Image: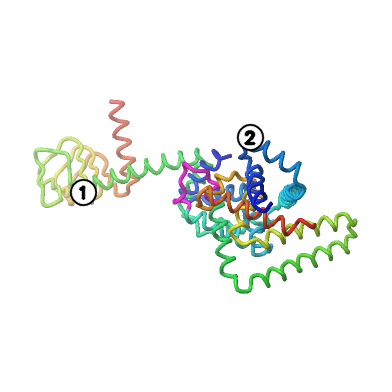
Amino acid sequence: MELIVQRRIKQVLKGDQNAFGEIVELYKDKVYQICYRMLWDRYEAEDAAQETFIKAFINIHTYDPGKKFATWLYRIATNLCIDRIRKKKPDYHLDAEVAGTEGLNMYSQVASAEKLPEEAVENLELKETIQAAIFKLPEKYRSVIVLKYIEELQLQEIAEILELPLGTVKTRVHRGREALRKYLRNV
Amino acid sequence: MASCQKEIVRLMHRYLDGELVSGEKRKLKAHLESCDNCQQHFLELKKTIAFVQSASHLQAPEGFTENVLLSLPKEVKTIGMQRWIRKHPFFVAASLFLTLMTGGFFSLWQQETENFAFTKHENLQVENDTVIIPAGEKVKGDIVVENGNIRIEGEVQGNVTVINGEQYMASAGNVTGDIEEIDEAFGWMWFKLKKTAAGVFD
């Protein structure tokens, strides 16, 4: 896959936007997922994911072909999400609760309309609880947890994405796991 | 207890990151078997990880790629052209051939229009860019004048051809062969072709 990506990047460098479309197709789910787990809002996640790709296209000449493309792309995505979280900080937690409740309401409406079995409703609620727990994490723990357990990346790659020493990433993973344990132990 | 806990918790996390050597693994295992608190803690961590992992697999909304492409800065025109060229190589080759051919031909024609030239004969006079056959003189053979005029006051025993110029015939003038004026590029080409062909057959 990396080989195809490198070839497409060469075409993008010449200005070919169709080639970039293929890159977007390959990575859109992963990038959207990072944004959604970080921001916990579908519209905001879509917006951030699109911004990630637009930024990648504009700055494609700064990408070093000797390194993994995904690492570079995910760095753009996490940085964008962290920026958004920091900008929103003063009222973000209020927002978050609203977003969370909205999600729950939406799901319960869906559930009542389609008469989902109780099990499925519980499953949806569990997913919401888990997402809420991830979202409660401070952003520096949230990013490492999302990259490690949702994107399933190696610690070394996470260190490269976040441009942090490996030791710092490990500490953050440990603390993030401990915090999540406290949120989820009684579920 | 608290200090033992701290060290053990660190071992748990290093275990979860796959970093324990076998001696440490044994130590952790032995402790977990003897300490309910730590065992509980360890199970909660494992459960937490399983929960978080179960949250994965989201897909980007529909139309995502199209929206991204629509938001990109406008594509450089030459790229659209290059893509088109890649798709229609034969057409491109043919049109390139034609362009080069006509281009070469026209530049040749343009080049030649700059030079005033005519077939040399002993009795000819030249004023500026006009070739004159004086009255009473006789020229045997064909005359070709390029980029100039010809005035015939005497007699030409042969054909007269004027390229990019005009021929004036005095009332006393006489041409035994054909008189031809060629102005257009096409006519010039035809003339050249005829000449080449005649050369070949001679």
Dot 2: element = helix
Above or below, comparing residue B98 to residue A121 in the picture: above
B101 with respect to A41 (left or right): left
Q: Position of residue B95 (x, y in %)?
A: 45, 42
Amino acid carrying label 2: it is Gly
Report the magenta residues as a range: A60-73
* Relative to A119, residue B31 above or below: above
Q: Chain of mark 1?
A: B
- Coordinates of residue B37 in the picture (x, y in percent): 75, 50
Q: Is residue B193 left or right of residue A100?
A: left
Q: Tell me which amino acid carries mark 1.
A: Glu
SS at circle 1: loop
- Give B77 or B96, whichever is nearer the viewer: B77
Residue A61 among those drawn in magenta:
yes
Of circles 1 and 2, which is in front? 2
As for residue A165 lying within the magenta part, the answer is: no
Q: Quadrant of residue B63?
A: bottom right
Q: Residue at x 76, y 65 (%)?
A: A103
Image point 21% across, 48% down: which residue? B114
Q: Which mark is drawn over residue B23? A: 2
* Mark closest to the chain's N terminus, 1 or 2: 2
Left or right, residue A66 beside residue A53: left
Label 2 marks a residue whose chain is B
Residue B173 versus residue A114: which sits nearer the camera?
Answer: A114
Q: Horizontal and vertical percent for residue A136?
A: 68, 63
B162 relative to A49, above or below: above
Question: Which of the numbered marks, if any, corresponds to residue B114?
Answer: 1
In front: A55, or B33? B33
